[in-house]
Image: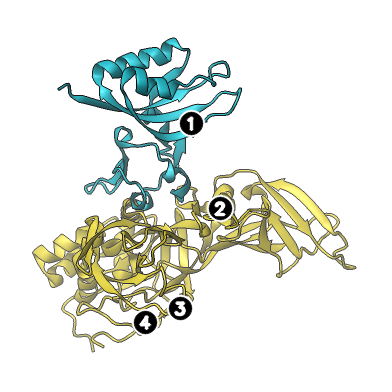
Amino acid sequence: MEEKYSQKIVIRYTAEIVDQPIVCRLARDYDLDFNILHARVLPKREGVLALDLTGTKKNFDRGIRYLKESGLRVEPLSKSVTRNLDRCVHCGACLAFCSTGALSIDPSTMQVMFDSDRCSGCSICVKACPARAMEINFL
Amino acid sequence: MNTHAVSKTYQEINRKIKEGKAVVVTAEEIIDIVEKKGEVEAARTVDVVTTGTFGLMCSSGAFLNFGHTSPKIKATRVWLNNVPAYGGIAAVDCYIGATAVVEDDPLNSIHPGEFNYGGGHVIEDLVAGNMIKLRVEGYGTDCYPARKYEKSVTIHDLRDAILFNPRNAYQNYNCAVNMSDRTIYTYMGVLRPMMANANYSTSGQLSPLLNDPYFLTIGIGTRIFLGGAQGYIAWQGTQHNWNVERGQNGVPREGAGTIAAIGNLKEMSPQWLVGASVLGYGVSLYVGIGVPIPVLNEEIVRFTAVKDDDIYAQIYDYGVDYPNGAAKSVGEASYKELRSGKIKLNGKKIDTAPMSSYYKAREIAYILKEWIERGDFLLSEPHQLIPSGKIGN
């Protein structure tokens, strides 16, 4: 059996394509499991959709090609959540609500570290960081 | 009668500082020194131990005087960037408190509220040199006829700007858990139900008042690091309490002493005064404070060598007990355990997270050390010590 491949992605819609059932096609035509992490899709306007996709690497690549050929912008989710280092005071309050361990404290320096590869894009940190150091550019 | 093997005075230490000969170490560095050399030798070698803390300190704010206007106004109501300041003092004086929330904020009407802007942010904007919209209302008198005044100002346009924090640098603090069945949003951060996480807030072994648990050196007039500048301890802080349970090392096992701090806001920096938005709770201010502890004798150096393993926090339930005003300790944990990321309570392993920045606390202790080594910062002998318990009691 082929090994499962998993990646979190962000899809940006244009107004022309917003009525296409793309998630359904990803599942049906490319046999990809999907978990919607974030969605903001408005009729006849641009939108954004964050998905956790799982399937074979081959099907994943074909699915992404389909999305791009349909005129959608696709990028890894990790690019959407960022930390503004100028605002971060390294308090660590974020550790209380980051469920994936993307935010952690380096015990040697006591600095808060952000590992975007582990980020699920739940974006709770954006509102819960008291210094407002976490930013999301979904919209 | 002095029974100490080592005995130094403030004057002697200051003389060494001026000559560039003082030995200054941080409250972390002193731990190993005392362990290796013993108290007496450490007290002989080291002259000053620097401490630091950087955390949310709600009981903070600034007195501002914006100068007389023409025609004159007796300000009764004052707003800075639409955040209300207290105007019930003289004509053009006001006090902007850290927790004041901007007008028209939805607060917690959609729970948990975001509290994006307030007094803490105004203070940060001021020290950053940003433009602030000042709006003033008065009722008009013969000597102060104007009723309205508006102007965009920066901190440089203000006649005076004095940071005055009635309660800072708590000596030890609660560790918060939530035993209820819903997520709660507190000043101790987000607490998930059924004790899913525990939050704490102190810099432990680096914390100023934990390094001088009986206030042997910290008192009124002690010169300190405050918000990036040199400030002073003005008085004991509000809620100052020395009559608490202590460990064998004299360190309070719960929230105890506090200080009131004062300094020139115009000399401070946005790196050390940072506005904070605490989800579901409100606005606050991160304040950076560092206190130098003069090593006058071996007893003082022993207190500064305290380490996280030997400092305990009481754990309180913020789900039911605390809000009802009936907080009772449900357990305790050392700062070493808390800082490890997990504690054990009622047989359950709980994730921990700090609310105060150990990283910045350490930075403050280093900066203060540098200031003293360079001779830019002299120790001041307190005019009066802060009330405290007796050693051994």
Q: Are marks 2 and 3 in contact (CB under 8 Å)?
A: no
Q: Are marks 4 and 1 in contact (CB under 8 Å)?
A: no
Q: Which mark is residue B242?
A: 4
Q: Is residue B2 left or right of residue B224?
A: left
Viewer-proximal residue among B125 and B376: B125
Real-space CA distance between mark 2 and mark 3, rounded to the nearest whole angstrom: 25 Å
The amino acid beneath tag 2 is Phe
The amino acid beneath tag 3 is Gly
Q: Which mark is residue A138?
A: 1
Tags 3 and 1 on a common chain: no
Tags 2 and 1 on a common chain: no
Q: Are marks 2 and 1 in contact (CB under 8 Å)?
A: no
Residue that lies at the very extreme toward the left in this rendered image = B36
- Helix, strand or loop status at disc 3: loop
The amino acid beneath tag 4 is Trp
Residue that lies at the very extreme toward the top in this rendered image = A69
Residue at 39% in and 22% down: A75
Which residue bears the numbered disc 3? Answer: B325
Dot 2 alpha-carbon crowd within 10 angstroms: few under 14, some 14 to 19, many 20 or more: many
Residue B381, x across and y down, in percent: 39, 73
- Helix, strand or loop status at disc 4: loop
Dot 4 alpha-carbon crowd within 10 angstroms: few under 14, some 14 to 19, many 20 or more: many
Tags 4 and 2 on a common chain: yes
Viewer-proximal residue among B205 and B38: B205
Which chain appears yellow? B
Q: Is residue B23 visible?
A: no
Real-space CA distance between mark 3 and mark 4, rounded to the nearest whole angstrom: 20 Å
Chain A colour in the picture: cyan
Rendering colour mode? by chain
Which residue bears the numbered disc 2? Answer: B115
